[in-house]
Amino acid sequence: MNANEARLARNTALAVCALVVLRLAAAAWTPLTFDEAYYWMWSKSLAGGYYDHPPMVAIVIRLGTMIAGDTLLGVRLVSILLALPMSWAIYRSAEILFGGRRIAASATILLNVTLMAAVGTLIVTPDAPLLVAASLLLYALAKVLESGRGAWWLAVGAGAGAALLSKYTALFFGPAILIWLAMVPKLRRWFLSPWLYLGGLVAAGLFSPVILWNADHHWVSFIKQMGRARIEDFRPTYIAELIPTQFAFATPLVFILGVMGLYALYRRRAGAMEARVLVNTMFWTIVVYFTWHALHARVEANWFAPVYPAFAVAAAVAAVQVQWAPREQRTIDFCRRWAAPTGVVLFALLIVQANTGLLSGYRRDATVRSVGVGWQELADEIEAARVRTGASCVLAADYGTTGWLAFYLPKGTCVAQQGQRIRWVNMPEPSPAQLSGKLLYVHEVEQAMPASLRDNFARVETVAEAKRMRGPLTIETYALDLLEGAKGEVLDRSPPPELQ
């Protein structure tokens, strides 16, 4: 490595570390989203699987809280630090596949400045470990290509297994790898090698706890996630959401670079065949599925997370390696120069907006309900009402409110979701003594208490209303209902709709 290459690698590492520090600062300031609070509750009772997802997100949160406690930073710490191995993996992947440290540095920075990576590691969801696993998987496949050594298929299996432990979307990596091998003549020999199948066994072994958990719970998690888009529900209007949401999540300039990079790879204007096909299969296999999915149901923007490592490499190819016509080159030069600053500014603006509402003049925006701004103050009011009424447990109608209550109420407070008990099957239930006394039911005033719950108690009284605020904006108003004299089972143990 010459002096210029060493300087480039060092500057890339410093830039990634600076971005990680920025996310850590944002993490310590930004209240938890309802999903994060829900996953935090998972982390208190680790298991092989959960109703919604595999267990990796719970493990990530558990590791962070072991270091920094049950704090905003503790919940998010390890998720944010995962950007470091993710960055190393994408750097090495781009370097191996397309040669040179300039393209490696570019891919690393471009991935890190996308909102998918910046927000996706700050807000702890299954997408954070999935991004890392996808990057490590791409690196392991690049090493298979570079070295020709079968033992690297074990690393491929480990990467695929880690991805499967993060999110079921990783199942598409299997077909993507097989398509890559089939399309590149020199790689077809691996179909006759035991190493490929040993790698598959490694992935299956890592994923086996999820399979065993599902087997013990009527396959409910598989049924829930794999039955999202039904063929009979044809709703093509959702297709219109795909490009705008990815334009935002990738940030506009990275999106332009990525699209131009994919076009250049399609036209064979950069890289060897095997590298081009690898990037394309890791990208298009998942994109094609979600495009089909969008014909039947909504596709959330974050679901595209596993394609972002390959997309960042394609963006770097466009920025560094392809020779463009003069007009196209001006576009490339502009995007390359301003992609990183734009990504950082958009991230900072998003964090400011989510916490304050300032940029929208304190009106509602897309973040206002999901980010728990105002929940600490709301929880203080709920706790005061609980103490005043002598309630032994706090009940909630949905998993998000349950998670927020558990996180923001004093430690040890009895909190439970009254229905959907499948979500909490891994966690200890409230004791009979806690459920036999007075109960405080927390719900939004617009959502009436279910008649079945109201009729199950001898006395139901609204003892207070409490507002969740962001500045002058009332986000939600909650009714606090005191329940006394249970006539039967308090918790609704009806099976989930997937099992009915």
Image (tube, rainbow, N blue to C red):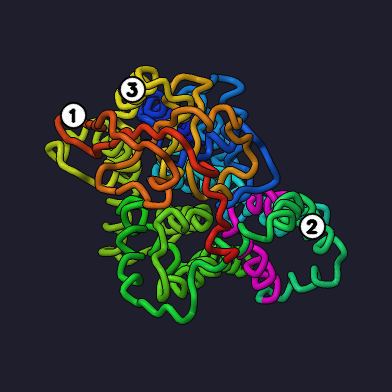
- Residue 110 — which label? none
Spatial distance from mark 3 to mark 1, Cα to Cα?
23 Å
In percent of width and height, residue 295 lies at 40, 76
Q: Main secondary structure of the magenta part?
A: helix
Task: Give the percent coordinates (x, y) of residue 424.
Answer: 58, 43
Does residue 180 show up magenta in the picture? yes
> Local crowd at mark 1 within 10 Å, few (<14), some, or many (≥20)?
some
The amino acid type, in three-letter code, at marker 1 is: Gly
Image coords of residue 18 (percent x, y) = 43, 28
Residue 473, position as x, y percentages in the image: 17, 35
Q: Which residue is mark 2?
A: 199
Could you give the CA–CA distance between mark 2 and mark 3, rounded to whole angstroms? 56 Å
Residue 9 sits above or below residue 283 on the image: above
The three-letter amino acid code for the residue at tag 3 is Ala
Read off the magenta span.
154-182
For image coordinates 58% across by 51% down, the residue present is: 51
Relative to 5, is 219 above or below?
A: below
Residue 214, by quadrant, is bottom right
| Residue drawn 72% across the image and 76% down it | 185
Q: Is residue 104 visible?
A: no
Horizontal side, residue 12 vs residue 2: left or right: left
- Using the image as rendered, state which of residue 378 and residue 429 is in the foreground: 429
Residue carrying label 3: 385
Q: Earlier in the sequence, mark 2 or mark 3?
A: 2
Discs 2/1, front: 1
Quadrant (top left, top right, bottom left, bottom right) of the C terminus: bottom right
Residue 431 seen in this snapshot: yes
Foreground of the two, 229 or 215: 215
**Upstream in the sequence, badge 3 or badge 1?**
3
Q: Quadrant of the N terminus?
A: top right
